[in-house]
């Protein structure tokens, strides 16, 4: 029972961690919360579903989903946020909510509201781990998450573009002065964050099904994880995502499943009030 | 006018004040006092901790150590609104106006301490409420005429010239009826004409019985206006005294010349 | 003398306006239209309430749907379980939402900008989950039905029996007018000015002696109370409350109305609530398409008209004033700046 909850928690947590990365990366370069990020998660899953329906093999369908998620994030930024660089934060926020509404309802128009299951070659099999039967797809989710995290780590710290993204998160104007194309950095940030978010949606598609509003709560959770990890802190977001998944899974098992979603919200409130810099964040002195 | 008779008492006393930011001592064991009715200047090289000192005095940031006394009241741990209530008002180094307000609306904000914010009288529009509102409007008119902004009262404050924006800020501060006015580099970025006019305004304000503590870089302004000067460097007091004393002091010359050397 | 006559005209104009507004039900026979108009009035109350904290104080909340819900549920519970009439549930709901608003404000308003947005979002979601899961009290996903109408009112020549939509109209209109007057009195006072100062520059406001935190909390409390009142009216008007009405979408809808109408403006609040309600009712037949266009509209407004409809109106008013001024000055070069009210971003 406890091990069961733990594995469920880690699977959930992996998904939250992948979602959190998108929020945190965008926050890093633009200091803004992309409220439409949950819809990228949903969009990627739907594209994977359709590609598979058209007869594509699983790996191709998953990749298509991920790429279209990245494209969606890229377009969002190019078409809307880029035009609003100097706008007040509140306007950006409302615009993001508007985008979320547009995407959710487009999905409903195209694919309908009823949940559908994304196929997975692993779903039917179980693996025996120390006497415990664990669904193979769960193991697949955890492995993919670990790979993605390593790739991201490599990208951020070992490539020139990754370093530019890091520099932009320190000070985007200064980055511009150093001859780095800030717009390109922002575009790439959006594309990568959204691609990873879409992957999260694709990974849970076989378990929690695919439907137009699937991104709403996943978005909230991912976003809670990014706050827990400290806004802008990518490794922090990953760890916090896992923590949130496990906590939620235990809370749902031992308290009440109806309030499972409230767990994340209570954690979010507590973190904001007690440690707004996140669990792993440092307090930054503000210059008045 | 003989100021010396009036100014025996200290209106502001700073004692052993310290503040560090992540290991850097912005203000270090600083002590000085400002006498009533004086124009007291704080000078020092860039990064000497002058603005931090102002933020400490007005309660925007809390000090690590030390004490700030206004007349006889300890205001060290008070918040900035409470300090304003005691009669200390200020302007900011980079002018902070309300972007959506006209000049008279901006100055009217300064009358908050006069009108208060009680809800019941406001909703019932009691006689006392209307009288206070009238008095506030009256005060705004007087102040705007005093600082020379009456003609532009209905224009948006943020659209005025730099010099006039500074005047709006001073007018807003005056509307709180301060006993002590803190001016943080009020003439930075002004042309000589604007500087001269502002200097006249400071003298006029001082003649109304308001003590002024001013941060400035313009030595001409400091020498002309101030009754007393405190020089600080690296958050510590270097020397203090009248303009003649300061100008000849070797430590001051070194601090300023040293700075030049570093820059070169 | 001139002054008095002017004031007289203004009063007369207001009186004619109110009478005209009261006559509306006589001209509309379709009960559905009456229903939509009543709905608009409830939304106006909500938007006026949220605008107090967003438009006038500069603190963003995307959790106000929860206050609306709390008001509605309190009215539903007290009227169905304890048999209290509308005139008792209303003050109870207003008081309760004010208290909860105070607590939430007191906890949350230490946070700024995005952090406050996130906290209000979390609060709204938690309250929604309580509506959904506290089945014993809230009826769970089914909600509470059979909420009674307000007791019949008799005004001699005409009476309100609250058996049809048109009967609710004068009652709702009364509360909207009260709310507008209340808002005006509040804004044009030392307290209201303190709020706008906080919105524009918190640090400068505090240095003028304004207790920033306390002022924000008081305004948040009042703002919550408006939504509580709107919730009570909603419960007694629709007769059913259920959790899905008061979810995140509701909070977003109210905030969108504030933004589309134009923040910090009573006329903007009325326009925002009316246009968006009419718009979404007009497209009722195709819900997905309706929400799609709704979303697009929001994005376009935020991109190109950041100050909402009032921003557009003010822009053109300034243009006309400028032209009139130029005509008056004839030849003299006038430099009337309309930059501040400009439509786009710099």
Image: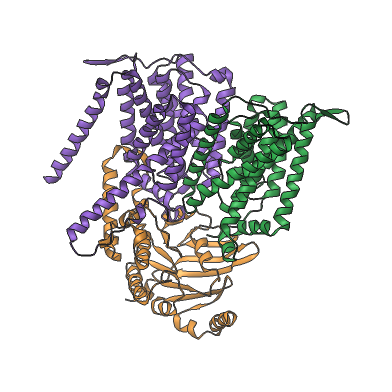
Colour setting: by chain
- State which quadrant residue A221 falls in: top right
Indicate the colour of chain A.
green
Chain rendered purple:
C
Where residue C82 sits: x, y (%)?
Answer: 47, 14
Percent from the top left, x then y, of residue C214? 46, 44
Apparent side of residue C297 relative to residue C7 in the rendered image (left or right): right
Residue C296 seen in the figure: yes
Name the residue furthest front.
A55
Q: Nearer the viewer, residue B90 or B16?
A: B90
Q: Colour of chain B?
A: orange
Image quarter hosting the N terminus of chain C? top left
In this picture, residue C22 sits left or right of residue B199: left
- Residue C179 picture quarter: top left
Quarter of the picture containing the C terminus of chain C is: bottom left
Query: So how many labels did they put on this image?
Result: 0
Which residue, as the protein is rendered here, is positioned at the far right?
A: A130
* Position of C229 relative to B172 (above/below): above
- Image x and y of residue C268, in percent: 35, 40
Q: Residue at x 39, y 31 (%)?
A: C279
Q: Residue at x 74, y 31 (%)?
A: A120
* A224, C221: nearer the viewer: A224
Tell me if residue A242 comes above or below residue C206 in the rendering: above
Most extreme residue toward the left is C1
Please, is residue A138 above or below residue A162 in the view? above
Q: Nearer the viewer, residue A277 or C222?
A: A277
Q: Nearer the viewer, residue C72 or B50?
A: C72
Residue A243 at least partly seen: no
Displayed quadrant of residue B253: bottom right
Residue A223: % across, % down: 62, 41
- Which residue is drawn at the image coordinates 71% and 38% (left, top)? A60
């Amino acid at each position: 029972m406890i091990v069961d909850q733990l594995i469920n928690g880690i699977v959930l947590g992996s998904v939250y961690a992948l979602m959190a990365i998108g929020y945190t990366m965008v926050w890093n370069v633009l200091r803004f919360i992309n409220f439409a990020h949950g819809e990228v998660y949903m969009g990627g899953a739907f594209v994977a579903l359709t590609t598979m329906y058209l007869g594509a093999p699983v790996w191709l369908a998953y990749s298509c989903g991920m790429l279209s998620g990245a494209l969606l994030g890229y377009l969002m930024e190019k078409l809307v946020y880029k035009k609003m660089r100097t706008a007040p934060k509140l306007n950006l926020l409302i615009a993001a909510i508007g985008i979320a509404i547009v995407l959710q309802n487009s999905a409903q128009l195209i694919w309908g509201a009823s949940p559908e299951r994304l196929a997975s070659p692993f779903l039917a099999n179980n693996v025996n781990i120390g006497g415990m039967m664990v669904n193979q797809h769960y193991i697949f989710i955890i492995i993919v998450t670990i790979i993605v995290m390593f790739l991201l780590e490599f990208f951020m710290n070992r490539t020139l573009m990754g370093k530019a993204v890091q520099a932009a998160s320190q000070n985007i104007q200064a980055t511009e002065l150093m001859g780095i194309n800030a717009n390109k950095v922002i575009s790439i940030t959006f594309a990568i964050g959204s691609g990873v978010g879409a992957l999260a949606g694709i990974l849970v598609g076989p378990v929690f099904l695919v439907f137009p509003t699937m991104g709403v709560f996943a978005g909230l959770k991912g976003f809670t994880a990014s706050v827990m990890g400290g806004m802008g802190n990518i490794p922090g977001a990953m760890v916090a995502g896992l923590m949130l998944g496990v906590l939620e899974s235990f809370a749902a098992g031992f308290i009440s499943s109806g309030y499972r979603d409230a767990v994340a919200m209570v954690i979010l409130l507590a973190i904001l009030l007690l440690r707004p810099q996140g669990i792993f964040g440092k307090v930054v002195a503000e210059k008045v | 006018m003989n100021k010396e008779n009036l100014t025996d008492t200290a209106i502001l006393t700073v004692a052993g004040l310290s503040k560090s930011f992540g290991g850097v001592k912005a203000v270090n064991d600083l002590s000085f006092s400002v006498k009533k009715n004086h124009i007291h200047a704080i000078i020092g090289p860039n990064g000497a901790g002058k603005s931090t000192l102002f933020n400490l005095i007005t309660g925007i940031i809390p000090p690590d150590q030390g004490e700030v006394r206004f007349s006889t009241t300890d205001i060290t741990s008070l918040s900035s609104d409470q300090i304003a209530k005691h009669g200390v008002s200020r302007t900011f180094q980079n002018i902070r106006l309300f972007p959506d307000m006209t000049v008279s609306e901006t100055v009217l904000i300064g009358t908050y301490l006069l009108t208060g914010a009680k809800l019941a009288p406001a909703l019932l529009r009691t006689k006392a409420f209307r009288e206070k509102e009238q008095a506030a409007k009256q005060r705004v008119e007087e102040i705007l005429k005093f600082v020379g902004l009456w003609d532009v009262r209905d224009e948006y404050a943020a659209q005025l010239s730099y010099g006039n924006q500074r005047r709006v800020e001073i007018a807003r501060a005056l509307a709180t009826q301060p006993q002590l006015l803190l001016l943080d580099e009020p003439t930075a970025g002004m042309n000589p004409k604007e500087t001269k006019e502002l200097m006249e305004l400071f003298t006029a304000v001082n003649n109304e019985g308001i003590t002024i503590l001013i941060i400035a870089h313009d030595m001409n302004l400091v020498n002309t206006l101030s009754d007393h000067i405190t020089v600080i460097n690296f958050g510590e007091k270097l020397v203090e005294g009248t303009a003649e004393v300061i100008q000849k002091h070797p430590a001051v010359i070194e601090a300023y010349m040293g700075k030049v050397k570093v820059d070169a | 003398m001139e002054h008095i006559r002017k004031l007289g005209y203004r009063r007369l104009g207001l009186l004619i306006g109110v009478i005209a507004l009261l006559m509306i039900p006589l001209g509309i026979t379709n009960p559905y239209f009456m229903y939509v108009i009543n709905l608009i009035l409830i939304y106006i109350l909500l938007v006026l309430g949220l605008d107090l904290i967003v438009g006038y104080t500069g603190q963003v909340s995307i959790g106000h749907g929860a206050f609306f819900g709390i008001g509605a549920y309190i009215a539903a519970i007290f009227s169905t379980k304890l048999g209290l009439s509308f005139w008792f549930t209303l003050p109870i709901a207003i008081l309760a939402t004010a208290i909860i608003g105070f607590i939430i404000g007191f906890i949350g308003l230490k946070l700024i900008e995005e952090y406050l947005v996130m906290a209000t979002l979390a609060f709204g979601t938690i309250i929604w989950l309580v509506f959904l899961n506290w089945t014993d009290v809230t009826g769970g996903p089914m909600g509470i039905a059979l909420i009674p109408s307000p007791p019949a009112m008799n005004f001699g020549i005409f009476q309100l029996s609250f058996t049809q939509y048109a009967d609710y109209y004068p009652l709702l209109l009364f509360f909207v007018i009260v709310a507008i007057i209340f808002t005006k009195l509040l804004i044009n006072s030392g307290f209201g000015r303190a709020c706008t100062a906080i919105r524009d520059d918190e640090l400068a406001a505090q240095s003028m002696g304004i207790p920033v935190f306390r002022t924000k909390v008081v305004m948040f409390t009042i703002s919550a109370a408006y939504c509580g009142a709107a919730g009570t009216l909603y419960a007694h008007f629709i007769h059913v409350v259920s959790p899905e009405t008061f979810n995140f979408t509701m909070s977003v809808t109210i905030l969108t109305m504030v933004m589309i109408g134009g923040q910090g403006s009573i006329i903007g609040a009325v326009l925002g609530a009316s246009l968006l309600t009419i718009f979404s009712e007009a497209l009722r037949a195709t819900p997905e398409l309706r929400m799609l266009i709704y979303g697009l509209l929001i994005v376009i407004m935020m991109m190109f008209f950041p100050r909402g409809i009032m921003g557009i109106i003010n822009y053109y008013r300034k243009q006309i004033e400028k032209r009139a001024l130029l005509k008056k000055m004839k030849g003299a070069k006038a430099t009337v700046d309309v930059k501040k009210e400009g439509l786009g971003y710099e």
